[in-house]
Amino acid sequence: MTTNTLTSETIAKDILPLNGTDHIEFYVGNAKQAAHFYQTAFGFKLVAYAGPETGVRDRASYVVQQEKIRLVLTTAIYPDSEIAQHVHQHGDGVKVLALWVDDAEESFRSTVARGAKPAMEPKTITDEFGEVKMASIHTYGETIHTFVERKNYNGVFMPGYVARTSELQVEPVGLKYVDHCVGNVELGRMNDWVKFYEDVMGFKLLLTFDDEDISTEYSALMSKVVSNGNGYIKFPINEPAEGKKKSQIDEYLEFYRGPGVQHIAVATNDILHTVAELRRRGVEFLKVPEVYYEDLIERIGHIDEDMADLRKLNILVDRDDEGYLLQIFTKPVEDRPTVFYEIIQRKGAKSFGKGNFKALFEAIEREQALRGNL
């Protein structure tokens, strides 16, 4: 594994200034029910809505939010729409990884000049709360990046949406922000997309994992992590590697019908509380065997958390040169074995849990075997 450190000089020369993740938009079969799921299971709060009642004729979108994490859940009104076709092809999945910028038009123009394929030309939308400027480019599969400039807007989300609350009593679970988003691409395409993020987006290669780092007896994958200059946006990109049986990436590509967002890692400051609450609300997690904890302290050294609590909740721990992290992965949150979530708490560590890869991937393989897809 190689690690490249992002320096202050790199940040100063960032060719595409990004402030963070603005929102993540899913295309789903039933947005009303998906919004209910994210409220009851994950503790998100309903904050905005757009649909036929607001003058939007072809879709309904619910915006749910928890701290800095904002999800837009969109469904088609008509069966021949792009949204319906996307859901038919991929199931419920991520369509838009929206990036918060200070200048949407410049972000679009500069990335297109460096080779990005345009998805939506710059446009300005307005209402009584101000204006939002947006533009989009294509990335892997049917996923797009939308640049969102909202410095002149003080509404709940953006023009076209109205504030919407629910009578459902929702308690947050402690999720804070998007830590990273992982994309799965076809065999042989990982380096192409790494080059896209380097050349077009100005990202830097942060970490590389090969099939020796990420493998089990049966399957393997390769992954590279790219990050923007300030480190606010990190995109690991995975591709399958040769193995005795079908890898988790192969399974994803088969059931998603192509490349797309595999999982979203969301940060918490208290993973014990967050995971206990999520479990209580019915969120299902991958399970590693008890033997994982037998030599954990010897492997990772002192940690603040009680080992019994980690074992009870099946939380994984890993350490790098700067500290340690705690992480756990949900099972897929759709019926197809595609999108899932990672819950992560960083206590100094800037890595991605390399020491947990084997245990994690064996857990995924057990789930694949149950589905008949290993």
Image (spheres, rainbow, N blue to C red):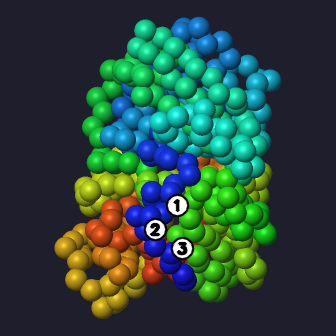
Tell me the kind of residue under disc 1.
Answer: Ser
In the rendered picture of this protein, how many numbered marks are placed on residues? 3
Q: Are marks 3 and 1 in contact (CB under 8 Å)?
A: no
Judge whether 329 appears above or below 280 on screen.
Answer: below
Residue at the spot x=32%, y=76% of the render? 322
Would residue 184 be found to the left or right of residue 20 on screen? right
Instruction: Specify few, some or many for label 3: CA neighbours under 10 Å numbering under 14, 14-19, or 20 or more.
Output: some
Would residue 221 be found to the left or right of residue 172 on screen? right
Q: Are marks 1 and 2 in contact (CB under 8 Å)?
A: yes
Quarter of image, res 9: bottom left
Q: Nearer the viewer, mark 1 or mark 2?
A: 2
Location of mark 2 (residue): 6
Q: Measured from the top left, where is residue 178 in percent x and y? A: 43, 50
Location of mark 1 (residue): 227
Q: Measured from the top left, where is residue 166 in percent x and y? A: 36, 22
Under circle 1, the secondary element is strand
Q: Viewer-proximal residue, 7 or 207?
A: 7
Tell me the kind of residue under disc 3.
Answer: Leu
Of the numbered discs 1 and 2, the one sitting upstream in the chain is 2
Measured Cα–Cα span from mark 3 to mark 1: 9 Å
Q: Viewer-proximal residue, 205 or 245?
A: 205
